[in-house]
Image (cartoon, grey):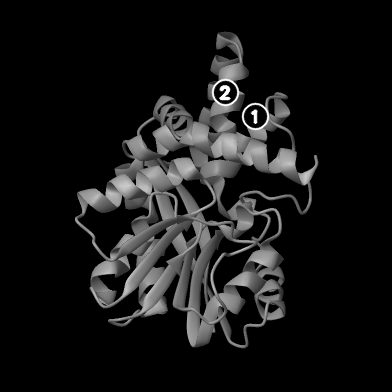
């Protein structure tokens, strides 16, 4: 796929997902809370700082630090997708934030001056970019000396059964293509040594990476399917393509595959994010 076509498809996909993301914001942020807390703590923003959030989606991570940097500071809440920027703008207005600038920015070509921000946040964004190495190099370029980058990606698929188990079933039934090595995706940066190398090669001298567990609770397989479909994205598109009979067959397989994670009242599907701070 040529770059222009790839860009068009990515924008269409995010536009299609935007409504579901906005609708599921509260549920998603509850699950993401341990990662958000880690990123905010390790970025350690100060009053008056200028902080850039990349791939901000609805902007929730950046909005956590907006009160900390205060009116003398500035949060640049940015995303590749105009649809996501619209959602972030609505959310920022709901929160009454006045020190936030919403911008459409491509993380691989950040339209900011060198040495122009004190900190950068990116929650689960670099792994979905076509060229994360370029994005990390751009991040280093716009950071001032002594500035910090705090970001997260998902660890490997075997450590994230909350998404990988259903994904394997969809692949086996032919409704989802198997992941291509090196292609953007949930787990492409899930190897800690690979990730560390990418960050160091981008010009960061100090890199620390930690595992941060997350937990997804579902009362039933039906609820798992409902929430995953509401979020849009590849699962939703794949599930919609399946016939009713195929959906029932896949739900039976999921029930068996989820059995090791059964708890009173449903299932607790674990996950692990790799969280990094670099300077």
Give residue 57's position: percent from left, percent from top. 44, 50
Q: Pointer 2: residues within 10 angstroms few (<14), some, or many (20+)?
A: some
Q: Disc 1 or 2, which lies upstream in sequence?
A: 1
Badge 1 element: helix
Q: Which mark is residue 239?
A: 2
Give residue 145's position: percent from left, percent from top. 52, 89
In this rendering, would 191 be left or right of 69? Answer: right
Marks 2 and 1: in contact by CB < 8 Å? Answer: yes
Q: Relative to the observer, which residue lies in front, 23 or 137?
A: 137
State the CA–CA distance, disc 1 to disc 2.
Answer: 8 Å
Q: Relative to the observer, which residue lies in front, 202 or 179?
A: 202
- The quadrant in which residue 233 appears is top right
In this rendering, would 157 be left or right of 27? Answer: right
Give the mark toward the camera: 1 or 2. 2
Does residue 235 sit above or below 78 in this rendering?
A: above
Viewer can see residue 155:
no
In this rendering, would 203 be left or right of 264? Answer: right
Badge 2 element: helix
Quadrant placement of the C terminus: bottom right
Q: Relative to the observer, which residue lies in front, 264 or 123?
A: 123
| Residue behind mark 1 | 170
Q: Residue at x 27, y 81 (%)?
A: 47
Q: Residue at x 72, y 78 (%)?
A: 201
Q: Residue at x 31, y 61 (%)?
A: 63
Viewer can see residue 143:
yes
Does residue 68 sit above or below 80 in this rendering?
A: below
């Amino acid at each position: 796929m040529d770059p222009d076509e790839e860009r068009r498809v990515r924008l269409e996909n995010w536009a299609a997902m935007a409504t579901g993301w906005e609708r599921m914001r509260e549920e998603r942020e509850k699950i993401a809370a341990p990662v958000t807390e880690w990123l905010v703590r390790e970025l350690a923003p100060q009053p008056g700082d200028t902080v850039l959030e990349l791939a901000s989606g609805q902007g929730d991570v950046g909005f956590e630090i907006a009160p900390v940097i205060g009116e003398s500071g500035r949060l640049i809440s940015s995303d590749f997708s105009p649809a996501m920027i619209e959602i972030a703008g609505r959310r920022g207005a709901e929160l009454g934030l006045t020190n936030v600038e919403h911008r459409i920015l491509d993380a691989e070509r950040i339209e900011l001056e060198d040495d122009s921000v004190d900190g950068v946040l990116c929650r689960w964004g670099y792994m979905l970019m076509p060229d994360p190495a370029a994005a990390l190099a751009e991040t280093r370029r716009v950071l001032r000396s002594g500035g910090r980058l705090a970001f997260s990606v998902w660890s490997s698929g075997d450590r994230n059964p909350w998404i990988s188990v259903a994904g394997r079933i969809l692949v086996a039934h032919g409704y989802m293509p198997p992941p291509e090595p090196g292609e953007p995706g949930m787990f492409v940066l899930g190897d800690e040594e690979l990730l560390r190398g990418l960050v160091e090669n981008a010009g960061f001298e100090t890199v620390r990476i930690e595992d941060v567990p997350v937990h997804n609770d579902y009362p039933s397989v039906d609820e798992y399917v409902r929430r995953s479909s509401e979020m849009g994205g590849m699962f939703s598109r794949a599930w919609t393509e399946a016939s009713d009979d195929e959906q029932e067959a896949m739900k039976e397989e999921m029930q068996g595959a989820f059995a090791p994670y059964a708890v009173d009242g449903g299932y607790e599907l674990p996950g692990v994010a790799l969280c990094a701070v670099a300077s």
